[in-house]
Amino acid sequence: MSEHPAELDRVAVVVNGNAKRVTEDLVEMLDQIVQSGDLFVSRSMEEGQEIARRIVDRGYPTVLTGGGDGTFTQMVTWITAEAKRREKDPPRFGLLKLGTGNALAWVLGAADYKGRGVVADLARVRQKGGSRQLRLLDVEGTLAPFAGFGVDALALSHFNATKDAFRKLPILKDVGTGGLAYFVAITGRTLPKVLLQPHGRVTIRNMGEPAVRLGVDGQPVGPPVEKGEILYRGPYRGVWFSTVVYWGFGARIFPFAEDREDRFNLRIVDVGSLDVAWNIRSIWRGDYRDDRLHDFLVEHMEVSFDEPVAMEIGGDAAGSHRTVQVKLAEPIEVVDYYAPPPV
């Protein structure tokens, strides 16, 4: 399809048809609000990639994704890659809060679906709402605000495996894809493994511009870590990295992510489960400090493990990996509901 002038002011809305909150009633409501042909429902990676091609082909200036952070991550990655392949500028991206954790909803001010917040956000976008630049990570070709290895990634991996097993059982296939599967996966597989297994070991090497080591007070300590030098080698419970402060549900897991525009926050956690439970409030606020929290500001790094470890990218399970390259990507333009509309 070729680019049509009448479509240049349109807003494309892409919703994840597999998301729990994306019901038939919601799709019908969005279809009444969004112009005909501008609502896309994706239920598989193949459909998502085809939708990305159609969006670039039509030249939409703004694309909103409805689902979790993973839906945003996938569509931004596919659309940006397709635009680059065609030597076009990528569109402005935005988020409709239809997922559960939705770290980006806190970053960009997207309203909750309860109380028809999605309708209000769509109206603001159509009124040329405010915009800003958002930095992302490039994790082996996937663009995402955050990613990592740890309990959350392991839990996602166990949940997906448990959900697949339940689907094969007629008595459980209709009830075992949500809370029940999460409960069984976490209590039966994730927690026993985390509590009983020894701490893993990780090696993280700086592959780019000089990195900064931060002390417990968040201030730089020691000389810069140069390219090729080891950032960290030792035990871990979690290895996470982000360009945004929030992880999800309003938790400020990366308090130093926005300290520098040219660096992201690498955080290595070796804190025990009991310590996490005891200090959960201060961890949630982002002011928990401990010698077993190791923070760095990094531009490009390589993370290596002795054996494959479960990974998550943008809140979605991303398989198991032994070695991963992570670097800052080019920023994208996003809809910022906190920002006032341009004059």
Image (cartoon, helix red, strand yellow):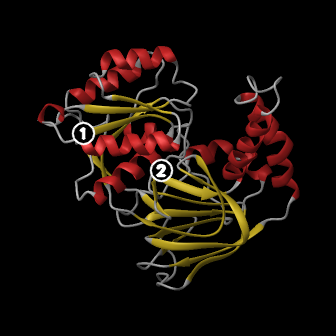
Q: Which residue is mark 2?
A: 245
Tell me where residue 88 appears, x and y as whole percent. Answer: 22, 54
**Mark earlier in primary sequence (2, 1):** 1
Q: Are marks 2 and 1 in contact (CB under 8 Å)?
A: no
Q: Residues within 10 Å of mark 1 (few under 14, many from 20)?
A: many
Residue 60, numbered circle? 1
Residue positioned most to the front: 1
Residue 243 falls in which quadrant of the image?
bottom left
Position of residue 300 relative to residue 246, above or below, is below
Q: Nearer the viewer, residue 109 or 96?
A: 96
Q: Secondary structure at mark 2?
A: loop
Q: Quadrant of the N terminus?
A: top left
Residue at 76 percent across and 32 percent down: it is 167
Position of residue 55 relative to residue 169, above or below, is below
Position of residue 95 relative to residue 122, above or below, is below
Residue 19 falls in which quadrant of the image?
top right
Q: Quadrant of the C terminus?
A: top left
For badge 2, the amino acid type reads Val
Residue 320 falls in which quadrant of the image?
bottom right
For badge 1, the amino acid type reads Tyr
Residue at 86 percent across and 49 percent down: it is 192
Q: Residues within 10 Å of mark 2 (few under 14, many from 20)?
A: many
In screen coordinates, is 199 left or right of 127?
A: right
Tell me where residue 283 appears, x and y as whole percent. Answer: 62, 48
Q: Secondary structure at mark 1?
A: loop
Position of residue 160 relative to residue 205, above or below, is above
